[in-house]
Image: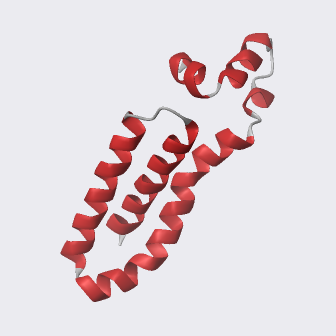
Amino acid sequence: MVPFLEKFFPDILRKAANTEVNMYCVYDSQVLTLFTSSLYLAGLVSSLAASKVTAAYGRRNVIIIGGILFLAGGAINGGAENIPMLILGRVLLGFGVGFTNQ
């Protein structure tokens, strides 16, 4: 989305404007990769840890924790002003995914 790219990834938007045929190399950004992958990495780590938390606190409590993490991650992403806030929100969403998958 152009407004999102304008605010958080303006260099990628400039590359996209100058590209005529091949859009593949436009999205060559380590920060964009970190932003995209942070949810999946956090989901992987938390799903491995969630089994011990589930054994200690029970499934119902883990699902509630996952819901709280989803709410916090969505709120942070919704109000994000910079890239670290976006990444933090994605990490919290990833933790929510990992805990609710358990």
Query: What coloring was used for the rendering?
Result: secondary structure
- Residue 62 is drawn in which quadrant? bottom left
Residue 38, given in percent of the width and then of the height, sits at 57, 53
Foreground of the two, 59 or 31? 31
Q: Is residue 81 above or below residue 22?
A: below
| Residue at position x 80%, y 22% in the image | 22
| Residue at position x 52%, y 24% in the image | 4
| Residue at position x 42%, y 39% in the image | 77
Would residue 9 appear left or right of 28 to someone viewing this image?
A: left
Would residue 86 appear left or right of 31 to someone viewing this image?
A: left
| Residue at position x 22%, y 65% in the image | 64
Q: How many marks?
A: 0
- Residue 31 is drawn in which quadrant? top right
Residue 45, given in percent of the width and then of the height, sits at 52, 70
The C terminus appears in which quarter of the rendering?
Answer: bottom left
Residue 33, given in percent of the width and then of the height, sits at 67, 44
- Name the residue furthest left: 60
Q: Is residue 4 above or below residue 29?
A: above
Residue 44, given in percent of the width and then of the height, sits at 52, 67
- Residue 36 is drawn in which quadrant? top right
Would residue 46 appear left or right of 8 to someone viewing this image?
A: left
